[in-house]
Amino acid sequence: MVVGGPLARARDDGRLTGLVAGVAVAVALGWAAATLPVASVALLLAASVAGLATLLRPEWVFLLLPFAVPFGELRALNVGGVEVGGVELLIAAVAGAWLLRGMARRDVRLPRAPLLAPLLVFVGALLLSLLSATSMPAAFKEVAKWLEVVAVYVLGLAFADEAGAKRGRYVAALTVAVILAGTLEALAGIAQSALRAGPPSYAILGGRLWRAFGQFGQPNPFGGFMNLTLMPVLSGLVGLALLGWRGAGRVSALLTPLLLVSGAILGLGLALSWSRGAWIGAVVGGAVVVLGWLTLTLARPAPDAADATRRRAVGALWVIALVGLLLALAGATDLTPAGVAGRFGSVGEYLGGFDVTNIQVTDDNFAVVERVAHWYAAAGMWADHFWTGVGAGNYAAAYPDYRVPRWTDPLGHAHNYYLNIGAEAGFIGLLAYLALALAALVHQARVAARRTDWARRALALGVLGALVATAAHNVFDNLYVHSMGAYVAILLCLVDAADAGP
């Protein structure tokens, strides 16, 4: 028997779930209004509205995820002794709503996800390392963090597929959300620096400013986060300079002011982080973006002689600017302020070779010696557990058995992600991570080479630069903290979602 009318139509398009939920929420709110205080009722009402919005339109709630990465931990919940931030809550809610909607439609369809296989292989390597783990809560937390990366990557692609003819608008909305989230976080860091917030050890430039750290609590991950947004913005600007508005399309006229303002704010935030690792990442990632654009643009025939001349001139200017920046940052010119030159010059101390057990620790070398001490501990863990490591997330738990004398605080990780993953997941885990990183880099390069339009090429080259910047910074730190992996997953799904369109 076929049932007609509004009920059947609601069932057909998947809105029956929302209808039932709305009735249930209305009943619950009516009961709450009669029995609970006004403040509790208001909180419950806000939560109900948010829940219904997520249930009915999870794809639009997903657009809040870029903002949740820097700002989601302002208010964390304690669930069973585990701190749950805004990112975790948002991913769980959106994933559950997407799954329920698919079940209501009897059409739960996984999108085409080019990087899903290497992601799952890496998660499998982390699971294998649990055989050696001594702290299972820490191990499960680390595995859950990477499962969130998988979920964000797949959900972003799924929502883009469901957008159908409006895929381009959805990808554009998510791209703008990423740029705005990074810019707002940069503004927060700049304000901290100007107001001299934070401990006295963050003082820079003679105490006139403080190091920026944003909502990440520390300057180094803040600097790494700046690069994740700055590289796509830089890529868009380089593309506009090379192609011009005519070659980039009408949308470039609308995005140019946003890119210029955002790029300036992000660059200032990066500088004020005073993070050597982030600076190195920015130089390497920016070089990849500029050289990628030059290689792909100058190799394509120009529509006329005038445009060809302009491209060569702009390309030459970018090369001169890049070389000048590299020389300045290396301290080879007098353009670099003494404080900045000193920060870069101290990078060589990491590789200079010294006995970390006997070196005299001073205020000037404390950060370097502390990091190298944790590298030693990670190397010891890896040597004793070569194949599968001490267990995902178990660096801190194993640290007391491998620590260097005088350095008792495990700091949570080895301040070098490659040594850290080797220590925690062994050679198998490191190999799986390197395979994932290489697959992601090659994939972005292929998309950039295949797509000739400004927007998609800019996005692919920008994400390529962000991945390279992160890879370089990870030599001196571990950037997969504070849900930064979820932000990387958003960037990856943006490129694939855009590439899948016409």
Image (cartoon, rainbow, N blue to C red):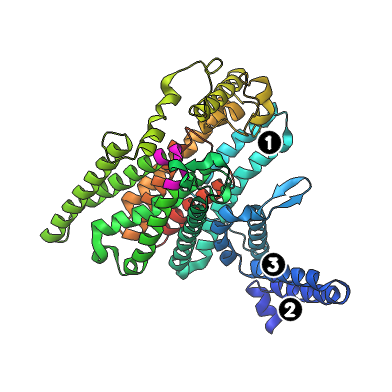
Q: Position of residue 122 (x, y in %)?
A: 56, 37
Q: Which mark is residue 51?
A: 3
Residue 299 shows up from this direction = no
Q: Is-magenta flag for residue 80?
A: no
Q: Position of residue 97 (x, y in %)?
A: 66, 63
Cα distance between the residues tagged 3 and 1: 30 Å
Which residue is painted at 39% across and 64% down in the image? 258
Residue kind at label 2, given as amino acid type: Met
Assign the N terminus to one quadrant of the image: bottom right
Q: Earlier in the sequence, mark 3 or mark 2?
A: 2
Q: Position of residue 333 (x, y in %)?
A: 26, 36
Which residue is painted at 39% across and 42% down in the image? 442
Q: Earlier in the sequence, mark 3 or mark 1?
A: 3
Q: Is residue 50 left or right of residue 449?
A: right
Q: Is residue 390 positioned above or below 306 on the image?
A: above
Q: Position of residue 37 (x, y in %)?
A: 84, 71
Q: Secondary structure at mark 1?
A: helix
Q: Earlier in the sequence, mark 1 or mark 2?
A: 2
Is most of the magenta stretch helix, strand or loop? Answer: helix
Identify the magenta region: 271-280
Cα distance between the residues tagged 3 and 2: 34 Å
Cα distance between the residues tagged 1 and 2: 53 Å
Q: Is residue 228 positioned above or below 106 on the image?
A: above
Q: Is-magenta flag for residue 272?
A: yes
Q: Secondary structure at mark 2?
A: loop
Q: Which residue is disc 2 drawn over? A: 1
Give the mark count: 3
Q: Is residue 144 positioned above or below 69 on the image?
A: above
Q: Which mark is residue 139?
A: 1
Residue kind at label 1, given as amino acid type: Ala
Residue kind at label 3, given as amino acid type: Gly
Q: Is residue 395 left or right of residue 430?
A: right
